[in-house]
Image: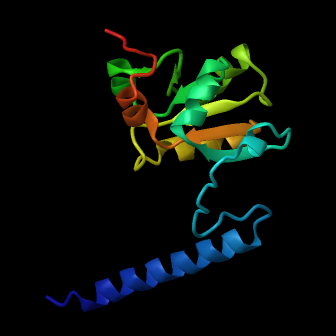
Amino acid sequence: MNFSKPILQAGAILLLSFIVSLGSNFISGTPLPLIAKELEQATDEDINSSEPVLLVISIDQAKSFFDNNVLFLDARDEIYYNKGHIKGALKNIFFMELIFNIEQIQKKSDPLVVYCGDPGCGDSEDLAYNLQESGFTKLYVFKGGWLEWSAANYPSEKIN
């Protein structure tokens, strides 16, 4: 049996699909970047600015936000959230329901801190970008996440 013809056809279809999707992205009104830009570290000036931001914060900055009653969002799955999370953080649920819950607490222009499990987890950045697309303007990603927060013995809670 000769498999070379179906393999060549599949390869041609994949190549054509790739070219069409790149072209569609290029001509779209809001093209997606091909490589995600690394988020910048927030400075004190950034935090006090009235401009829209999406920045990374340190553990000290996260603790300062916590002490100032800024809302935290846990981007992890519910199982991990239930095992332990930053005290008062909202859990990651169906996105539209999450937006509704946030809007019941604060305005889209108020600061939000999004975190995940550890520095290697990208869920917090993904959630922050989705929130930005939904109109939230003051987004801070705490890359140290639950791992760094719990290691510092900062306020936390769990659901039994």
Seen in the picture, residue 56 relative to 20 is either above or below; the reply is: above
**Location of residue 149 in the rendering, given as x and y in whole percent from the top left corner:** 43, 30
Seen in the picture, residue 147 relative to 19 is either above or below; the reply is: above
**Location of residue 119 in the rendering, given as x and y in whole percent from the top left corner:** 42, 47
Q: Quadrant of the C terminus?
A: top left
Is residue 25 visible to the viewer in this orientation of the structure? yes
**Location of residue 110 in the rendering, given as x and y in whole percent from the top left corner:** 76, 27
At a point 40% along the width and 50% down the height, the residue shown is 120
Left or right: 137, with 89 as reference point: right
Near-viewer residue (109 or 60): 60
Q: Quadrant of the N terminus?
A: bottom left
Number of numbered labels in the structure image: 0
- Say which quarter of the image contains residue 49: top right
Seen in the picture, residue 128 relative to 65 is either above or below; the reply is: below
At a point 72% along the width and 30% down the height, the residue shown is 111
- Say which quarter of the image contains residue 50: top right
Q: Name, please, the residue furthest toward the right.
A: 50
Q: Name, please, the residue furthest toward the left.
A: 1
Is residue 98 visible to the viewer in this orientation of the structure? no
Left or right: 38, with 1 as reference point: right
- Say which quarter of the image contains residue 65: top right
Q: How is the image coloured?
A: rainbow
At a point 37% along the width and 35% down the height, the residue shown is 147
Near-viewer residue (34 or 38): 38
Left or right: 118, with 2 as reference point: right
Left or right: 38, with 148 as reference point: right
**Location of residue 153 in the rendering, given as x and y in whole percent from the top left corner:** 39, 22
Seen in the picture, residue 21 relative to 117 is either above or below; the reply is: below
At a point 84% along the width and 43% down the height, the residue shown is 51
